Image: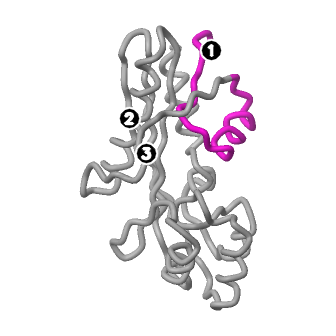
Amino acid sequence: MSKKIILASASPRRRRLLRQIGLTFQVMPSSINENNSICHDPSANVQAMALRKARDVAARLEDGIVIGADTQILVDGEVFGKPKDAADAARMLSRLSGRIHRVITGVALVDAGTGFEETWAETTLVTFRELSQDEIYAYVETGEPMGKAGAYGIQGRAAAFVERIEGCYFNVVGLPLARLVQKLRKLWG
């Protein structure tokens, strides 16, 4: 791959995932406010937000492929972004307890040199076991839920809450890697 890759995110999880698959990239976080909903459809919303982030960074560059991403959690039609505080994190985890929820990540690729844009969304179903209030509060006290959609990190302590996943595990962490690599390869022919 000859073009430089720029990740439009400060997320340490997304950086780790890209390093894990051997990509060389730069990090240039977008300045887009992530708490604004753009569309009522969750899949369209995460794609639109990812595209806004990628465009924001691409506008500052002459060339390179910018990767933008946005993740949301849905349970019974309710959208969970990042918790506002510890009480919000505990509320989200209580709602996820004993249920299946959807993790939707929107990804956008923007070629800063040509203006080419592509977006898509990946959905993974995650089943949580029943959680006690003590478990929820102990987990919230670790601080791990903060800054994470749905108030949990599957790659961290919350792994003990997950009974089953259907779909891409890496999507739940923050980027659907297999599909991302396929899309990047298409850009380079």
- Mark 3 / mark 2, whichever is N-terminal: 2
Cα separation, mark 3 vs mark 2, equals 8 Å
Mark 2 lies on residue? 51
State the residue in front, 185 or 111: 111
Contact (Cβ within 8 Å) of mark 1 with mark 3: no
Query: Residue 62 appears at what percent x and percent y?
Result: 47, 8
3 or 2: mark nearer the eye:
2
What type is the residue that disc 3 sits on?
A: Gly
Mark 3 lies on residue? 106
Mark 1 lies on residue? 1
Cα separation, mark 1 vs mark 3, equals 23 Å
Specify start and end residues of the magenta stretch as a single range.
Answer: 1-24
What type is the residue that disc 2 sits on?
A: Leu
Image quarter of residue 162:
bottom right
Label 3 CA crowd tier, 10 Å (few <14, some 14–19, many 20+): many
Q: Tell which residue pokes out farthest to the left in this image.
A: 40
What type is the residue that disc 1 sits on?
A: Met
